[in-house]
Amino acid sequence: MISLVKYLCTVFKCDADALPDIIRQHPYKVFENIKDLHLYYSPTSRKNDELTPVKADGITKAGVCTLFACGGHLGITVEQYYYMRTGRTFRHPKLQCVIQQQGEYGGEIYLPIELIKVDQKR
């Protein structure tokens, strides 16, 4: 498995610093490249953590440093939310999130691209 950041950098022939601008300019093109991949979410970087399968339903234009978590009800960004929950800081806070629809009611979960891995063996 490789990180989604590394995968997208390979596909779009760029480095991680340029990736947020590419995603912001072409979110549909990026989504088309990831929608059929086998994606897994890992909230920490520890190898023994379980990976949770992710079904990508979209991609945000805003990065984790500006996107509000929980529909804005908490008044904190996704970056602040993950710091409070896991103590994790992001290397690339301008990178966006994968959107996963939650249940029948249309709630959305924002999963930072930096925390997603791609299984290329499938």
Image (cartoon, helix red, strand yellow):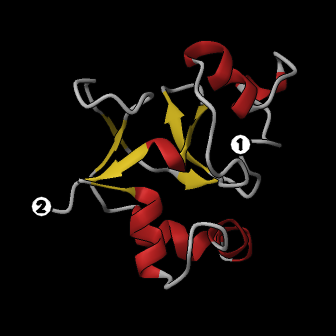
What's the CA distance linking mark 1 and mark 2?
29 Å
SS at mark 1 in the image: loop
Q: Position of residue 119 (x, y in %)?
A: 22, 54
Quadrant position of residue 80? top right
Residue found farthest to the right: 75
Residue 110 to residue 75: above or below: below
Q: Along the horizontal axis of the image, is 24 left or right of 4?
A: right
Q: Along the horizontal axis of the image, is 54 left or right of 114?
A: left
SS at mark 2 in the image: loop
Task: Identify the residue at horizontal 87%, vertical 21% (top origin).
Answer: 75
Sequence-earlier tag: 1 or 2: 1
> Residue 83, labelled with which disc?
none
**Foreground of the two, 78 or 92:** 92
Q: How many marks?
A: 2
Q: Position of residue 69 (x, y in %)?
A: 73, 28
Q: Amino acid at mark 1?
A: Val
Residue found farthest to the bottom: 13
Task: Identify the residue at horizontal 46%, vertical 70% (top origin).
Answer: 8
**Circle 1 residue:** 64
Q: Residues within 10 Å of mark 1 (few under 14, many from 20)?
A: many
Q: Position of residue 19 (x, y in %)?
A: 62, 70
Task: Identify the residue at horizontal 34%, vertical 49% (top origin).
Answer: 117
Quadrant position of residue 90? top right
Q: Amino acid at mark 2?
A: Lys
Q: Residues within 10 Å of mark 2 (few under 14, many from 20)?
A: few
Residue 16 to residue 110: above or below: below
Tell me the quarter of the image containing the C terminus.
bottom left
**Circle 2 residue:** 121
Residue 100 to residue 121: above or below: above
**Foreground of the two, 98 or 78:** 78
Q: Position of residue 13 (x, y in %)?
A: 49, 85
Quadrant position of residue 15? bottom right
